[in-house]
Image: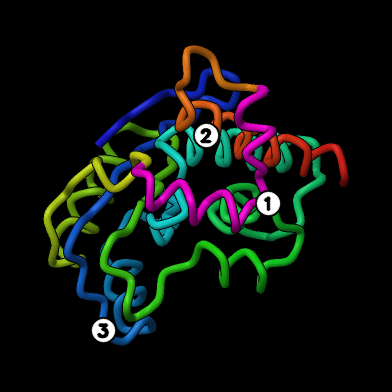
Amino acid sequence: MIIRHIDEFDKYVGITGFKGVKIGLLSDFFAKICRKTPANVGIQFFDAKLIASWEHIYFAIFNALAAFEKQTNISRSLPMEAMLYASAQHQIAKATKLLGITRSSSQTAVLLVGEKLSDVKLAFSVVSKHVHAEEDESVLELSDEKAALIKRAFAVSQQEIDTVSERNDQNRALADLVIERMALLATKR
């Protein structure tokens, strides 16, 4: 799990991925995790197939925290606000359709956010027990197949990627462009 402290908001953020997830009934899955997780830790699951990097999730939660501080948030929930930013959408239904997990999601990205590092780590252990899968941060990384899906989902053109890329690092350019689209969401509120 990647753990960062966001000094500006005094929050700890944990980001990781899981491969081979078997979710089953979503309501049962979420209920089990929520019952055993510290109440002061926010959790958001993403279908990892459209996550451009761990930074994609990091900047989504950073923007969500800023939105709550400025009182420009759309959602009442910090994790859902992160979903809105990660998807670069203004509507919760569109955001969850794009990046939310389903029964068939086998690779998931997980965001944990809280005030205490110990609570974030405890929440991670609860999530780890209930996803019935192996932690694997490689699901956060870009492959050629995943990059093609992300380009379509976020309407990123090859011309944009070529303009932004340095030394032919097309994947880094794509991740940067997705993060830029999230930042633009904040300016439209």
Q: Helix, strand, or loop for circle 2?
A: helix
Q: Return the disc, 1 or 3, that comes first in the chain's sequence.
A: 3
Q: Mark 2 vs mark 3: which is more N-terminal?
A: 3
Circle 2 residue: 175
Residue visible at 71% across and 43% down in the picture: 68
Q: Is residue 53 above or below residue 4?
A: below
Residue positioned 40% across, 47% down in the render: 111
Q: Main secondary structure of the magenta part?
A: helix
Instruction: Say which of marks 2 and 1 sits in front.
Output: 1
Report which quarter residue 160 is drawn in: top right
Q: Is residue 34 left or right of residue 22?
A: right
Q: Label 3: which residue?
A: 24
Check if mark 1's residue and mark 3's residue have beta carbons within 8 Å: no
Q: Which residue is labeled 1 in the image?
A: 155
Residue 40 in the image: x percent, y percent?
Answer: 44, 49
The span picked out in magenta is 143-163
Q: Is residue 188 above or below residue 90?
A: above
The residue under label 1 is which amino acid type? Answer: Ala
Amino acid type at mark 3: Gly
Compare residues 15 and 65 and report the one nearer the observer.
Answer: 15
